[in-house]
Image (tube, rainbow, N blue to C red):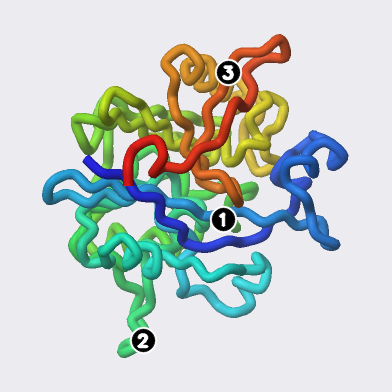
Amino acid sequence: MKLYSVNTGHFKLDGGAMFGVVPKSLWQKTNPADENNLCSWAMRSLLIEDGDRLILIDSGLGEKQSEKFFGYYYLHGDDSLDKSLSRHGFCKNDITDVLLTHLHFDHCGGCIQRDSANDLLVPAFPNAVYWSNEDHWNWATNPNPREKATFLKENILPIQESGQLKFLGREESIHPSIDMLWVNGHTEAQMLPRIRINGKTLAFMGDLIPSVGHIPLPYVMGYDVRPLVTMGEKADSLNRAVEEEHFLFLEHDPVNELCTVSQTEKGVRFKETLSLGDVFGK
């Protein structure tokens, strides 16, 4: 099994929204804001190669939305899904599985692309199975007012219409070396894979812990539908990460791919940052 970090691009979100009730004087130490109070964030996917399977975890924002839509999020940098896959010697047609942690647009937008020849929305990974779960799918396709703007039908419904969608049950996974953590604070039934490789565990943190700056328990995004639930889920995940020496894969951290954590007198805290290649080989 081989692991690859796939940078699909950077975008900007309001720092206050990303850190909830935490004062700017604290969160800006790890995530400095620009003059508009916006912080830069990565959209970092994980690619798993094992034999004839190529599993992509999340797909970034994609490229099919309008210029007006992208204008809200200040896309920047040279990274893209296609460029990053190519850098590792792959293309979209090679992907056999797409595991979606959840269906917010910055995690699943790259799953669907626009066919310019006939202006149709089609799967970006024509040979892949797309994996979600029934609880989250129902939540996303019948959205509450709080999350409605981030569950975009054009990102979601074409997956089902193509016949490529499959659901995972609570005790199921897509690979023998992957188990799933289900969490409900950020959104209903977010699925976070933990990958066991060469005696080590890589925990994909998704939007439970988006960056190093979100490790302290009160540092919870304003986007979360159940912030107190998020705090409990973070505590459980971080305690387990300390006990089992997990490496945390950070989907939105603008700089750091991985980090480790340790127990301190103030609770679980950041220990060190690492690259995927340093820990799991290149």
Answer whether labels 1 and 2 touch (C-beta < 8 Å): no
Decide: marks 3, 2 in contact (CB < 8 A)?
no
Viewer can see residue 43: yes
| Whole-number angstrom distance, CA of label 3 to CA of label 2 | 50 Å
Residue at 39% from the left image edge and 63% from the top image edge? 84
Q: Which residue is mark 3?
A: 262
Disc 3 marks which amino acid? Answer: Ser
Residue under label 1: 150
279 w.r.t. 256: above or below: above
Pick whichever, 135 or 9, lies toward us. 9
Circle 3: element type? strand
The amino acid pointed to by label 1 is Thr
Mark 1 or 2: in front is 2
Vertical side of 35 occupied by 182: above or below: above
**Residue 206, visible in the rendered structure:** no
**Residue 78 relative to residue 203: left or right:** right
User: Residue sitting at 39 percent across and 44 percent down?
Assistant: 277
Q: Secondary structure at mark 1?
A: helix
Quarter location, residue 160: bottom left
Q: Position of residue 243 (x, y in %)?
A: 46, 12
Q: Which residue is mark 2?
A: 116
Residue 122's quadrant in the figure?
bottom left
